[in-house]
Amino acid sequence: MPDIKELIAKYVDPAKVDEAVAELNKELPLLYIPKTKFNEVNDELKIAKEQLVSTNKSVEDLTKKASTIEEYQKQIEDLKNKTVELETNAKNQIATITKKTKLKDLLVENGVHKDAIDLMVEKYLPDTEVDDTGIKDAKKLINRIKEEKGGLFVTVSTNSDDKGEGKGKPAGKPDDARLKKLFGLGITNPGEK
């Protein structure tokens, strides 16, 4: 590359060359960047762009992971809610089964005919309250049932055999038509279809 002074001397009066070079050296750094500085800044820019791309990729990956984590947290929360719901349903089912079992036991103990027990459980279950000791007000419930559906209770008469032992013998087994009538179900004669 030619020297600036020689280059200016070709076009400017030789007496003014030094003055032109001095002014050019003063103004040139304000207007132009030297090639070495340009290359250095350009390399830094390339590095910065690569870092920006890398950072953007990292942010994108983290955003995906964050949304994935949020989805997993939502799934966990949904599963917790479903577990609570299932536990509540299971407790309710257990309570209902326990209530039915205690009511059946009470009905059997008080002589309700075996064919009527399931129908009576369904009818009187909503009115039955159960605690740790059994059915609350069990005697009142049995008296109520006897008043409403007394024909469903089996009465036991004792007959002595030769040895003096009593034999329990059910009396008055209700038939299907009687049960249906007591519970307000439609009665059909066997010959009718």
Image: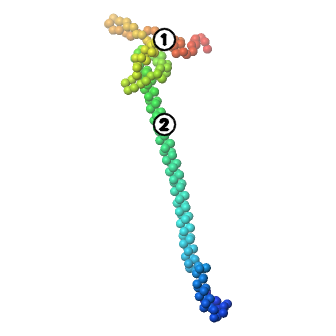
Residue type highlighted by circle 2? Glu
Q: Nearer the viewer, mark 1 or mark 2?
A: 2
Residue type highlighted by circle 1? Pro
Q: Is residue 176 visible?
A: no
User: Is 75 in front, or is 34?
Assistant: 34
Q: Spatial distance from mark 1 to mark 2, Cα to Cα?
A: 43 Å
Q: Which of the two labelled residues, at mark 1 and mark 2, occupies the earlier sequence position?
A: 2
Label 1 crowd (10 A; few <14 / some 14-19 / many >=20): some
Q: Are marks 1 and 2 in contact (CB under 8 Å)?
A: no
Secondary structure category for the residue under label 2 = helix
Q: Which numbered tag is attached to residue 174?
A: 1
Label 2 crowd (10 A; few <14 / some 14-19 / many >=20): few
Q: Position of residue 92 (x, y in %)?
A: 46, 30
Residue under label 2, please give it. 85
Q: Position of residue 130 (x, y in %)?
A: 41, 25
Residue placed at 56% from the left, 74% from the top? 41
User: Is 152 in front, or is 78?
Assistant: 78
Secondary structure category for the residue under label 1 = loop
Q: Is residue 157 left or right of residue 74?
A: left
The C terminus lies in quadrant:
top right
